[in-house]
Image (tube, grey):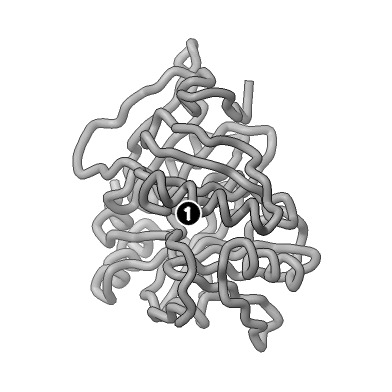
């Protein structure tokens, strides 16, 4: 088994979203997610706020371009590369030159592109509400294969699993650092990006972001609630293209504990009320 991601302390550095109108979606993130927006020479739009970065490129609505993970230093990045080469994983050429140094990528079983690199530490000078880009969630029709890839090839650790009464896996939460999960994978009819999430620290952070969303005309679409796995508080909104955005607080910190199996029922995904189950 590879322990590359855990050993490198990898965290979600940025995500890339596709949109038929990248400029309009960029304006949404600039206004509602309190980011500085820059039109890059490549034609992409770069949205940056404190500890959060989103790249928007032209493409199909509600599709993921890629995820960019940063590791703690160049030695850790070298370790990840060597682990992947040892497993004969095909490495992709970097598309993250504006944000990550020495980056390289892989493609998971569903075709999602994941890149690893060293952060260039290009935080914008502007100050907005705190909200660090924290995790990405996928929907998939081949959950076992996807979980196996992130666990065995990339070295993410399973933290919590959700199973139905027959013992079939429905959801898996995996981590690449000390936070409860940096990737969540749901069995779903829809393949691709399920949501992306921002950690705001505490309940007051949820309140402040909810107030800000209200002022900007971005209504809450799910929550407030509390997840069972991760034990975090949450609210959800949708961006201008319909992508789901989670604002989360008080996510569990995991140092070393066995993975837990949770029952597949609404109270697992929201102990306070209605849940989004993704699959039957």
Direction bottom: furthest residue: 41
Q: To which quarter of the image does residue 278 belong?
A: top right
In the displayed structure, 83 sits above or below 265; it is below
Q: Quick one: 111 or 9, which is closer to the camera?
A: 9
Q: Position of residue 170 (x, y in %)?
A: 51, 27
Nearest the eye: 183 or 197: 197
Residue at position x 50%, y 16% in the image: 164
The residue carrying mark 1 is 198
Q: How many marks?
A: 1
The residue drawn where x is 36% and y is 52% is: 201
Please indicate whether residue 32 sits to the left or right of residue 249 in the image: right
Look at the image and tell me whether residue 137 can be seen.
yes
Find numbered disc 1 in the image and state the secondary structure of the residue it sits on: strand
Q: Residue at x 58, y 43 (%)?
A: 236
**Which residue is outermost to the left?**
256
Where does the image place residue 136, in percent across and percent down from the top left? Answer: 51, 50
* Residue 216 as seen in the image, left or right of residue 272: right
Q: Residue 210: x percent and y percent?
A: 55, 49
């Amino acid at each position: 088994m590879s322990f590359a991601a855990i050993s490198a302390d990898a965290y979600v550095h940025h995500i890339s979203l596709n949109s038929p109108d990248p400029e309009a979606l960029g304006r949404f993130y600039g206004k509602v997610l309190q980011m500085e927006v820059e039109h890059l020479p490549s034609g992409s739009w770069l949205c940056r706020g404190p500890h959060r970065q989103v790249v928007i490129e032209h493409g199909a609505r509600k599709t993921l371009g890629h995820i960019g993970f940063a590791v703690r230093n160049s030695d850790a990045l070298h370790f990840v590369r060597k682990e992947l080469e040892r497993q004969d994983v095909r490495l992709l050429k970097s598309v993250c030159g504006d944000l990550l140094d020495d980056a390289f990528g892989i493609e998971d079983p569903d075709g999602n592109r994941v890149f690893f690199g060293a952060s260039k530490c290009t935080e914008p000078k502007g100050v907005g509400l705190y909200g660090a880009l924290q995790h990405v969630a996928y929907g998939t029709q081949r959950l076992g294969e996807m979980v196996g890839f992130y666990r065995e090839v990339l070295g993410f650790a399973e933290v919590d699993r959700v199973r139905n009464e027959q013992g079939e896996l429905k959801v898996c939460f995996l981590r690449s650092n000390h936070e409860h999960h940096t990737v969540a994978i749901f069995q779903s009819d829809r393949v691709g990006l399920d949501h992306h999430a921002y950690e705001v620290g505490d309940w007051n952070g949820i309140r402040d972001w909810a107030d800000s969303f209200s002022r900007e005309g971005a209504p809450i679409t799910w929550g407030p609630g509390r997840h069972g796995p991760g034990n975090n508080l949450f609210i959800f909104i949708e961006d201008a293209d319909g992508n789901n955005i989670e604002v989360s607080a008080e996510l569990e910190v995991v140092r070393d504990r066995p993975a837990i199996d949770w029952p597949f029922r609404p109270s697992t995904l929201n102990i306070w009320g209605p849940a989004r189950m993704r699959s039957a």
